[in-house]
Image (spheres, grey):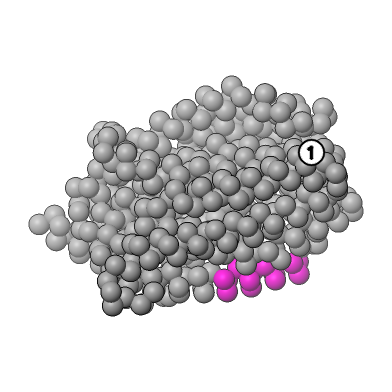
């Protein structure tokens, strides 16, 4: 009886194993895309508000913390991919008990990891700022923002694991709705704390934490009200060792891949910091523009994780291959269109963050370098997502560790020391992407041939 109800619910919600691929990919990916863009818009208000109404030093402090925040937060967000894959596979295989157990384990893991990050982040905030070589005039702002931001880690992780649970069941709309509510509060609270109360980085950090509390609690409310397989009973939240092992086996490499990017970006940020506050501010402003193109690509990456997870669980290997091909085409089209639009409007957009001409010019150079190379990011990120959906997270993690982190760290400590310029530090992004893309493509082809082409009649 329960499995029949599960089958009915999957069909009415979003059975990703049947029907038009492109239509379902778009219905799934567009809310994800909007979620990421809204999240970034709301995060960008932290930079914009302090840049316009506080000081350039406060703006530089918020921007300089971005790689550090990403290092710890994105690692555990990457781990949530393991939850997505396990739940998606269970739903595709119509295994209701496994899906329920995976949901309970995912919630418990999110809360445990969130508390760990909050405690660790507050302990290491000051030493990390010292290691980054943040200028003296920015240091105090940076430590304050970092400690307050990490204090909200339990709610940040809870939201991301909850969103992964909804995605595994084909629902990307509910996380979007909850994020929008929290984001609107974030913007209003930013302005209130800075303009009315006269706060600076502490105000925007507190606003961000409170916004994450709102979004995560709303998602928890909807999970408790769910009448499907992903319903959450708070009293039954606990870790199942087998599920945890599976989640970590898939999610740890994905988290490592995200952390590797962050580690390499911390090295790059230290190089940017050595060029002075103007370039720190320019990098922060440009990042908040160019990142929208990445969010487009990443929405299709997350789509691939769930689609491949459900279809592989259902044994539909030919459909898995077709999903990858068609999603790549759609992802590339969306990314290129948005990249062109961002390049056209980059200068006025940078002007929203700062009035300093030298900061805007430096920001323009970063935006151009990153967006011109966005095609590489499409292949690199989407094929990584396809492999994670197949449960093979280690391959993209290792190639990223060697090709991205290796290339960037080597350049920062060698070539950049000789050619100590803004262009020199920026070119490390497309160069490392190019090297990584080659190995990601090779890794995907080998994985596809081994896991999806076992049938002699399958055309790969």
Q: Residue at x 78, y 49 (%)?
A: 425
Question: The N terminus appears in which quarter of the rendering?
Answer: bottom left
Can residue 290 be seen here? yes
Question: The C terminus appears in which quarter of the rendering?
Answer: bottom left
Which percent across, then down, holds residue 329?
Answer: 52, 74
Which percent across, then down, holds residue 197?
Answer: 71, 33
Residue 22 drawn above or below residue 3: below
- Is 96 one of the magenta-colored residues? no
Residue 146 appears left or right of 103: right
Please name whichever residue, 154 or 379, is drawn nearer the observer in this view of the structure. Answer: 379
Q: Residue at x 31, y 50 (%)?
A: 86
**Location of residue 270 (image quadrant):** top right
Q: Secondary structure at mark 1?
A: helix
Which percent across, then down, holds residue 286?
Answer: 74, 53
Please name whichever residue, 288 or 324, is drawn nearer the observer in this view of the structure. Answer: 324
Residue 374 appears left or right of 229: right
According to the picture, the residue beneath numbered tag 1 turns out to be 273
Magenta stretch: helix, strand or loop mostly: helix
Residue 215 appears left or right of 87: right
Residue 116 drawn above or below residue 395: above
- Label 1: few (<14), some (14–19) or many (≥20) C-alpha neighbours in 10 Å: many
Q: Residue at x 50, y 42 (%)?
A: 256
Q: Residue at x 80, y 62 (%)?
A: 347
Task: Find the magenta span and give its range.
Answer: 332-345
């Amino acid at each position: 009886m329960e499995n029949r109800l599960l089958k009915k619910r999957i069909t009415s919600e979003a059975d990703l194993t049947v029907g038009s691929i492109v239509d379902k990919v778009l219905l799934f990916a567009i809310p994800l895309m909007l979620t990421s863009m809204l999240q970034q818009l709301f995060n960008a208000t932290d930079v914009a508000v302090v840049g316009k109404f506080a000081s350039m030093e406060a703006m530089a402090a918020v921007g300089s913390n971005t790689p550090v925040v990403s290092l710890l937060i994105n690692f555990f967000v990457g781990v949530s991919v393991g939850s997505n894959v396990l739940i998606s596979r269970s739903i595709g295989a119509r295994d209701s008990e496994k899906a329920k157990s995976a949901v309970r384990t995912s919630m418990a893991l999110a809360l445990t990891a969130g508390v760990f990050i909050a405690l660790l982040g507050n302990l290491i905030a000051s030493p990390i700022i010292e290691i980054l070589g943040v200028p003296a005039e920015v240091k105090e702002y940076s430590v304050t923002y970092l400690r307050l931001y990490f204090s909200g880690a339990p709610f940040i992780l809870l939201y991301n694991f909850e969103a992964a649970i909804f995605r595994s069941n084909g629902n990307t709309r509910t996380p979007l709705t909850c994020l929008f509510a929290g984001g609107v509060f974030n913007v209003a609270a930013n302005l209130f704390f800075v303009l009315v109360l006269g706060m600076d980085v502490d105000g925007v950090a507190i606003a961000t934490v409170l916004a994450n509390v709102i979004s995560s609690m709303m998602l928890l409310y909807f999970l408790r009200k769910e009448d499907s397989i992903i319903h959450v009973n708070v009293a039954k939240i606990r870790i199942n060792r087998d599920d945890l092992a599976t989640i970590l086996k898939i999610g740890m490499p994905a988290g490592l891949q995200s952390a590797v990017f962050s580690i390499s970006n911390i090295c790059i940020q230290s190089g940017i910091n050595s060029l002075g506050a103007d370039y720190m501010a320019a990098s922060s402003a440009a990042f908040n523009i160019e990142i929208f193109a990445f969010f487009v690509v990443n929405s299709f990456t997350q789509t691939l994780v769930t689609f491949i997870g459900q279809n592989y669980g259902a044994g539909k290997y030919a459909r898995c291959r077709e999903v990858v091909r068609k999603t790549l085409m759609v992802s590339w089209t969306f990314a290129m269109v948005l990249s062109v639009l961002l390049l056209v409007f980059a200068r006025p957009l940078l002007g929203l963050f700062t009035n300093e001409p030298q900061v805007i010019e430096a920001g323009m150079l970063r935006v151009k370098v990153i967006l011109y190379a966005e095609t590489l990011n499409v292949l690199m990120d989407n094929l990584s997502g396809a492999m994670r959906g197949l449960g093979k997270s280690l391959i993209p993690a290792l190639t990223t560790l060697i090709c991205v982190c290796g290339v960037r760290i080597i350049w920062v400590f060698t070539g950049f020391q000789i050619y100590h310029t803004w262009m020199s530090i920026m070119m490390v992004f497309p160069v490392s992407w190019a090297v990584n893309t080659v190995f990601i493509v090779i890794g995907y082809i080998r994985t596809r041939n081994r896991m999806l082409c076992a049938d002699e009649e399958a055309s790969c």
